Image (cartoon, rainbow, N blue to C red):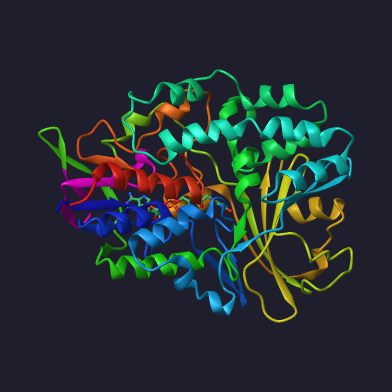
Amino acid sequence: MARVVVVGGGYGGMASAARLAKLGHDVTLVEAGTRLGGALTAVESQGFTWDAGPSMLHVPAVVRDLFRKTGRALEAELGVETGQELTPLEIVREHRFVDRSVLRLPAGSRRAQTAAFDELGKGLGQAWDDFVTPYADVWDVLRRHYFEEPWTPGHLPREVAAILDSRDTLHKALRRAFRDDRPAAVAGHLFVAEGHDLRNVPAWAGVATHLEQLFGAWTLPGGMHRLRALLEARLATREVTVILDSPVLDLVVRDGRAVAVRTALGEVAADVVVCAVDPRRLPTLAPLVERTMPTLPPVITHLGLEGDATDATEAGGLALTDETVVHGDPTVVVRPGGTAPPGHTAWTLHGRGRLSEDMLKVLARAGLDVRDRVVARVDRTPLETVQAWGGSPYGVLWQGRGTVRQRLGPTTPVPGVYAAGAHATPGSGLAYVGLGAALVAGVVGPA
Ligand SMILES: Cc1cc2nc3c(=O)[nH]c(=O)nc-3n(C[C@H](O)[C@H](O)[C@H](O)COP(=O)(O)OP(=O)(O)OC[C@H]3O[C@@H](n4cnc5c(N)ncnc54)[C@H](O)[C@@H]3O)c2cc1C
């Protein structure tokens, strides 16, 4: 049995800790904040509750696998009989384009997506299909040899390296695939929303469009932050020691191996350390990632609105899909969700680009004028978000094809140190972060 110390109690740290404890290790999780969850948490004000960070789940199998492999199944924890389980979305998101045309992107069906694009414009269905379908092969290779099976940096199978090292960018791939800007904006949205420049995103990362088509997108009634409490309970069941309010200042390395982590209160001894925070925060690891940059979170506004989802007035438009993207500069994403007092609705807005005016004005111009319905409002700048979570939950900024090999994980060059979380491989988002935790558990192995 190894003494494992996990640094950081976000989704990545909690998932790693639960898995390693189940494998029989003696696990301590050290978190800087006063509670666990990181971005997976709620914001509350005036009777409204919003997801502070993630509200949608892609590839739900990853979260299900975590719960099943560490104890009771997720469905049992959520209470399926009460209708509180993960819910697949029929429409992943609505795209409102600058020319006022609208696409409602269906989930989980190639045929339905093709039909939706055909409705948007002649021949667009075929073009969309031609773009997305080849990613099935990319997914197949990456899933088997990169996302789901532990590997050693520098020893990636040849077919994986051929994909990851390709010079093709998503920007170029989209220009080749579409003469119409709108499907390109739909495919690029997943990256633009996370703050990336498509000229720096490798083309293979577009596999995300295939995953969304294949697995859809899922929400949790009441908010994705409910997973936080379930994971906290799972850590207790697995007897993980949790130390809160204790930022890890650095790793302690002796004879070339990590032997502890250092906090303001002293050292916590370790045979194995899992870094589930931005490695820049730990001076021993920082030089290893000096060529990477974190991705800035969006400008976030949580709104409490008068009127509910059955309110059909156009100005309210409160019966929106679970995500609506108002394209332009700035681009504003509307995520209805969370909980609200009766007769009210909770929305979260994410803004990217030239935000020289209030996002509510941008929405009003796009036909979503809710300015006179606002009864509660919480604003968060990107800086406040990064400070709240001690780093960016969106992980590493794409800076070209080399970025994929500059991320740490599942192993690191420091013996005894592993990397999980949004800044580690295979990347950010609950699905990838969950896969990363499984990879770390796979390389550390059973006690
Ligand atoms: C606004 C927003 C919306 C998002 N929406 C989605 C979505 O819909 N779907 C999706 O899949 N993903 C989404 N994401 C991404 C997702 O939230 C993240 O990829 C994921 O939660 C990252 O988990 P993490 O554990 O790596 O990091 P974090 O959640 O950032 O957690 C890191 C933790 O480490 C702690 N910490 C930091 N430094 C130290 C230290 N030195 N010592 C100890 N502890 C430390 C922090 O306090 C924090 O608790 C969203 C992110 C944001 C910001």
Q: Is residue 181 left or right of residue 245?
A: right
Direction left: furthest residue: 255
Q: Can residue 277 be seen in the rendering of this structure? A: no
Residue at the image point whose x is 20% and y is 56% from the top = 25
Give how far across and how far down residue 382 sits, in percent: 56, 48
Residue at the image point whose x is 64% and y is 40% from the top = 209
Q: Quadrant of the N terminus?
A: bottom left
Q: Is residue 381 left or right of residue 120?
A: left
Q: Is residue 317 left or right of residue 19?
A: right
Membership of 276 in magenta stretch: yes
Q: Is residue 309 left or right of residue 353?
A: right
Q: Considering only vertical position in the picture, is 63 above or below 425? A: below
Residue nearer the viewer, 201 or 297: 201
> Which image quadrant for residue 31?
bottom left
Give how far across and how far down residue 27 sits, in percent: 23, 57
Membership of 186 in magenta stretch: no
How many marks are shown on the rendered structure?
A: 0
Q: Can residue 265 be seen in the rendering of this structure? A: yes
> Which image quadrant for residue 419?
top left
Q: Considering only vertical position in the picture, is 116 above or below 60? A: above
Give how far across and how far down residue 356 sits, in percent: 73, 44
- For the magenta stretch, what is the residue range? 259-281
Residue nearer the viewer, 259 or 357: 259
Give how far across and how far down residue 257 sits, in percent: 15, 37
Residue nearer the viewer, 377 or 184: 184
Q: Considering only vertical position in the picture, is 81 above or below 392? A: below
Residue at the image point whose x is 37% and y is 48% from the top = 437
Q: Considering only vertical position in the picture, is 313 above or below 170? A: below
Residue at the image point whose x is 36% and y is 70% from the top = 233
